[in-house]
Amino acid sequence: MAGTGEPQIIAGADGVTPAVLAAMAAMPDRRLHAILSALVRHLHAFAREVRLTEAEWEAGVECLNRIGRTTDDRHNEGVLMSDVLGLSTLVCLLNNGDAGATETAAALLGPFWRDGAPRVANGGSLLRSPTPGPALFVRGRVTGPDGAPIGEARVDVWQSSPVGLYENQDPDQADMNLRGILTTDADGRFAFRSVRPAGYPVPTHGPAGDVLRAQGRHPYRPAHLHVLCAKPGWKTLVSQVFDPHDPYLASDAVFGVTAALIGDFVEHGPGEAPPEPDIAAPWYSLDHTFVMEPGESRLPRPPIA
Ligand code: BEZ
Ligand code: FE
């Protein structure tokens, strides 16, 4: 038998899948064995189902190679492809909340989180360079499932600018603009000042863009804030909060919007006193509670440097 040192002579297409599975049967890492054997079974079934031609197989391999070539320290095409195919959200919802139900504060990480953002004091600003646009005041609270506050939690936030660009995509923004790390107080609260994020198109210069175009899909994400909460003893929460007024709310290019993630973005007019004197109307506020689950605290691998 293959995998035990015996030779394997392949007897036609039907013999390939059992031979590959047999060749890996004795893998010492049983979790890796489960993953790889399922991958082989599903890949082979996929090729059979669509009767994959040799030219199509070549195009698929070239697509994988282009994902690699398009990726560097500032751009992660692998994460982006996973996002536009819905895989990132599927993995997120399988691993958070009620095993696939949408009542979880978790959302996909996306390709733009950077580790090492500057610390921001509670009530401080995320702006590190002039960033025109309506002001946004965010007040958050981090709790456990029972509503009890989680103090001393790390709260990492990042967002696009009012023109829909992250600082790493925009030479007009200072390094780490609209990014920051806060710490919750004893009541689980944090607060910061920023500008209202805009929705934006995901990058389309690589294979993920080709997939969107071939599928006839637009590349837009509705406006949102990213929040990552971490504290030992609690499963790291990667979340997003969406602006309910965004026209793309119900057609996010990366399938990230669940009901639990739609935030209470409120517009304030000239009649309402702003929280700080230099603010012109309209300005915006957002109050949001993030619910963490007990579990392992680990930071994700940063998609970009
Ligand atoms: C983001 O929200 O930063 C994002 C997520 C998926 C693809 C592109 C961007
Ligand atoms: Fe984003």
Image: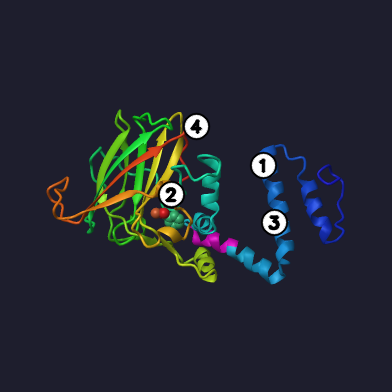
SS label for mark 2: helix
Image x and y of residue 88, in percent? 52, 51
Q: Quadrant of ligand 1?
A: bottom left
Q: Name the residue under label 3.
A: 43
Cβ atoms under marks 4 and 3 closer than 8 Å:
no
Within 10 Å of the Cα at label 2, are there few (<14), some (14-19), or many (20+) other Cα atoms? few
What's the amino acid at mark 3?
A: Leu
> Which image quarter holds the N terminus?
top right
Q: Distance between the residues labelled 4 and 1?
A: 22 Å
Pointer 2: what residue?
259
Is mark 4 in CB contact (under 8 Å) with mark 1? no
Tell which tag, 3 or 1, sits nearer the viewer.
Answer: 3
Q: Name the residue under label 4.
A: 295
Magenta stretch, residue numbers: 64-71
Magenta highlight on residue 68: yes
Q: Residue at x 85, y 61 (%)?
A: 12
Q: Earlier in the sequence, mark 4 or mark 1?
A: 1
Please name which of the two marks, 4 or 1, marks the residue nearer to the observer.
4
Query: Magenta segment: does it hold 89?
Result: no
Q: Residue 133, image x and y in percent? A: 23, 58
Counting residues from the N terminus, which is met first, the one under dot 3 or under dot 2?
A: 3
Residue at x-position 35% and y-position 55% = 244
